[in-house]
Amino acid sequence: MRSASISRKTAETDIAVSVGLDGTGQSKIATGIGFLDHMLDLFARHGLFDLEVKVDGDLHIDQHHSAEDCGIALGQAFAKALGDKRGVTRYADIHLPMDEALTRVCVDISGRPFLVFRTTFRVEKIGQFDTELVREWFQAFAMNAGLTLHVETLYGDNAHHIAESCFKGLARALRKAVAIDPREEGRVPSTKGSL
């Protein structure tokens, strides 16, 4: 089983993350941010990733550091679990509907991190969660996982549904991209020989 654990401690956060790429979608999430917990639970379930996340952050200031640093640590864990990426499918995409919202997510496990995030929210908060932190989390995750990641919400009205379609879309696209392609016969899926 491809898995990894990461611990990350700064003056702002203390984070422990473990991920199993070939799991069943079991999760144990405690970020201190209810909405982010919800998003990571469904990320694990729809990606079939076994995921444990524990964040102790400076929530007395705001949720920014906890959300961003969670994305950093989880991205690092994904990169570590992928190892040299031998045999992975590498590319995947999906259109993910969530009621009235539709989001397209395309991923390349390239080792060249880049994020295109074309999603907007009509409101600043989902409950107590700042909607701008959705992009911050995706940026931190993509950069540290080494992904080229494109996320675009084609349409939608409800901020919760839009955010959920982004996280579920990432989960479903990553589930396909990290899958082992038996036709690759253990090769790295690149003409360069490495990713």
Image: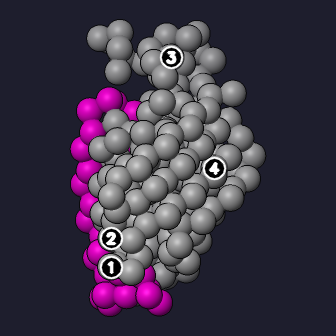
Q: Are marks 1 and 2 in contact (CB under 8 Å)?
A: yes
Q: Residue at x 68, y 35 (%)?
A: 22
Q: Which residue is mark 3?
A: 86
Q: Amino acid at mark 3?
A: Arg
Task: Say which label, 4 or 1, has the lower sequence index.
Answer: 4
Q: Residue at x 56, y 38 (%)?
A: 5
Q: Which mark is residue 51?
A: 4
Task: State the image coordinates of residue 80 (x, y, percent, origin top left).
Answer: 48, 30
Q: SS for tag 4?
A: strand
Of circles 3 and 2, the one toward us is: 2
Is residue 7 visible to us here?
A: yes
Q: Is residue 130 magenta?
A: yes
Q: SS for tag 1?
A: loop
Q: Which mark is residue 61?
A: 1
Q: Amino acid at mark 2?
A: His
Task: Say which label, 3 or 2, has the lower sequence index.
Answer: 2
Task: State the image coordinates of residue 148 (x, y, percent, origin top left).
Answer: 31, 41
Of circles 1 and 2, the one toward us is: 1
Q: Which residues are magenta?
A: 105-132
Q: CA distance from mark 2 to mark 4?
A: 21 Å
Of circles 2 and 4, the one toward us is: 2
